[in-house]
Amino acid sequence: MDKALEHSFVELLEKHQNIVHKVCRLYTNNQDAHNDLFQEITIQLWKAYPKFRGDSKFSTWMYRVGLNTAITLYRKSKRNIQTQEFESVQFKIKAEPYDDTEEQQLKLMYKAVHQLNDIEKALVFLYLEDKNYNEISETLGITEVNARVKMNRVKKKLKTILNP
Amino acid sequence: MDELELLKKDWQKGEDSYPKLSYNDIYSMLLKKSSSIVKWIFIISILEFVFWLFISFGLKASGYSMEIEGMENDFGFIAIVILSYGILAYFFYRFYMNYKTINTTDNAKTLMENILKTRRTVKQYVIFNLIVLIVSTAYMMPYALNQSEESRALIETARADGELFKYYIGIVLATLLVLAVVIGVLLLFYWLIYGILLKRLKHNYTELKQLED
């Protein structure tokens, strides 16, 4: 194994690890599953790394491999079915100033997002990461128009989940 | 949508809330084994190839086909053997090429298509083998029936009793039953393995594909 390659990869991933954590946050519901998916994404990133040419940003490249692993390659999906575990592992976000209603609303939103299917989650994830529709369409392999249409449907679906 | 904007704000605010894995934590992950479905599909496909090769070579090694007198010089039989090896080589090549095109850096839809293509090749290979099994069984049966003293004696007895037709029907039904059981077991096996492995992938692929229609 090429030590220099290994070193550069681990350093880059250490720096950008939040991207992987965020994918895991959306696609898993407990700490074990989170760690499991994190590891699988790391392995897939490492396997693909020799082909990474640096013509795209490392972080952009990570979004693609990370999402592909979560929605296509990852096998242990059974652990992700239960949603009730989610709240107990929600990441503590320091909301300042503390607003109870807002906090409550956010909790419900995160819960609603977890009820979406894999593809819808991918769209929401890229949207939350402030990716434009061009990037979303390229990551998922659909046209930009369809990405917009789908995103509107996801918004409607979230609304229905929140206000049944 | 206000709520989604609120979520976006919160999401982007939370950069410090994630666990921080150290260099060594990440490094140790590189040494772990992948549990991706591609790896499993690859392993299962190789096992399938080996299984059919084993059946084909195993039968030859035990001298089974050669025991049937005259078979080795029969044009039809030789044609079946040559054709099946040629097609086997073709399937190996296609499977390898499919596997090579699986690339995690492709977009999600292309990646899913490539994985499903690999699966499709193996499925075609299995169907091909089943057809060869059925055709060669049907082709070899008359030889097998006339080959040994015992079976010839049985035919003679059946003819003497006027039950030759019943005897042949019995043989054909018994063979069909064995083939049906073998095919049934194989189908159950594939359904169990690929049903579990590819269910989620197929579901996600359909979801993406629907958008394009």
Image (tube, coloured by chain):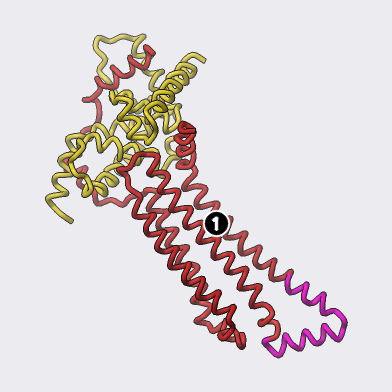
Chain colours: A yellow, B red
| Residue found at x 31% / y 19% | B8
**Residue type at the position of mark 1:** Phe
Q: Is residue B135 magenta?
A: no
- Residue closest to the eye, A155 or A143: A143
Q: Which residues are magenta?
A: B147-172
Vertical placement of residue A119 versus B61, above or below: above
Q: Point out residue B183 in the picture as x, y percentages from the top left corner.
A: 61, 62
Lateral position of residue B6 relative to residue A83, left or right: left
Q: Quadrant of the N terminus of chain A?
A: bottom left
Vertical placement of residue B172 versus B39, above or below: below
Give the SS element for disc 1.
Answer: helix
Quarter of the image for residue A149 reads top left
Vertical placement of residue A97 versus A107, above or below: above
Query: Residue under mark 1: which chain is it in?
Result: B
Q: Point out residue B87 in the picture as x, y percentages from the top left corner.
A: 48, 67
Q: Point out residue B10 in the picture as x, y percentages from the top left corner.
A: 29, 18
| Residue found at x 40% / y 56% | B42
